Amino acid sequence: MRTQHEADEAEIRQQIRTVIDALRTRDVDRLRRPYSADIVSFDIDPPLQHVGIDAKLRNWANVFAVFEDVRYEVRDLTLTVGTEVAFGHAFGRLSGTSKAGAPIPGMWVRVTYCLRKIEGTWLITHDQVSVPLDVRSGQGVVDLQP
């Protein structure tokens, strides 16, 4: 029999898989479900923060505007789960095919997820995506592999 902790971790992992699957199928309604209405996202695109589910979904709409075929991979997801708050970190890569048919190999980024159990459901309330920075040049380093 699974403990509550194991059940919570499984639900959180499923929420992350929902994001991955919804991106692949371009299902915006399904993509909305794992996020809280008041999510604060420090995404890769400007500005520095995106507040609310509509802002988060606009970021994903930008992806759909560029990609014909979308793949999103999450690797090495590590979770710390409490009774009402959880966080996780992983590596993520968005790749696929452009609208013009060209392959887009993507780049690996660092992803942090923060979740809260809201009315019995684990929802992503904050996420952050970043690339390492070469301090001397001021440029992001986008060719690293996990």
Image: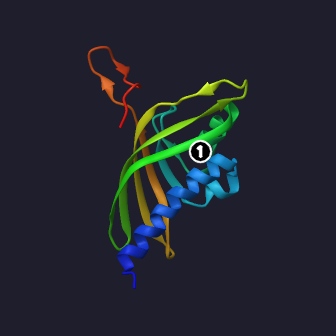
Name the foreground residue: 61 vs 16.
Answer: 16
Identify whether 79 is placed above or below 120: above
Q: Is residue 59 left or right of residue 8?
A: right
Percent from the top left, x then y, of residue 70?
63, 40
Residue 42 image-quadrant placement: top left
Mark 1 falls on what kind of element? Answer: helix
Q: Residue at x 68, y 37 (%)?
A: 69
Q: Is residue 37 visible?
A: no
Furthest toward the left, the residue is: 136
Identify whether 66 is placed above or below 116: above
Furthest toward the top, the residue is: 137
Q: Look at the image and tell me in which quarter the N terminus lies.
A: bottom left
Percent from the top left, x then y, of residue 60?
61, 42
Colour mapping used in the image:
rainbow
Residue 8 image-quadrant placement: bottom left
Q: Is residue 17 visible?
A: yes
Percent from the top left, x then y, of residue 146?
35, 37
Q: What is the count of numbered marks? A: 1
Q: Is residue 31 left or right of residue 42?
A: right
Q: Amino acid at mark 1?
A: Ala
Q: Residue at x 55, y 43 (%)?
A: 72
Percent from the top left, x then y, of residue 32?
62, 56
Q: Residue at x 69, y 56 (%)?
A: 29
Q: Which residue bears the numbered disc 1?
A: 55
Q: Residues within 10 Å of mark 1 (few under 14, many from 20)?
A: some
Q: Is residue 94 left or right of residue 133?
A: right
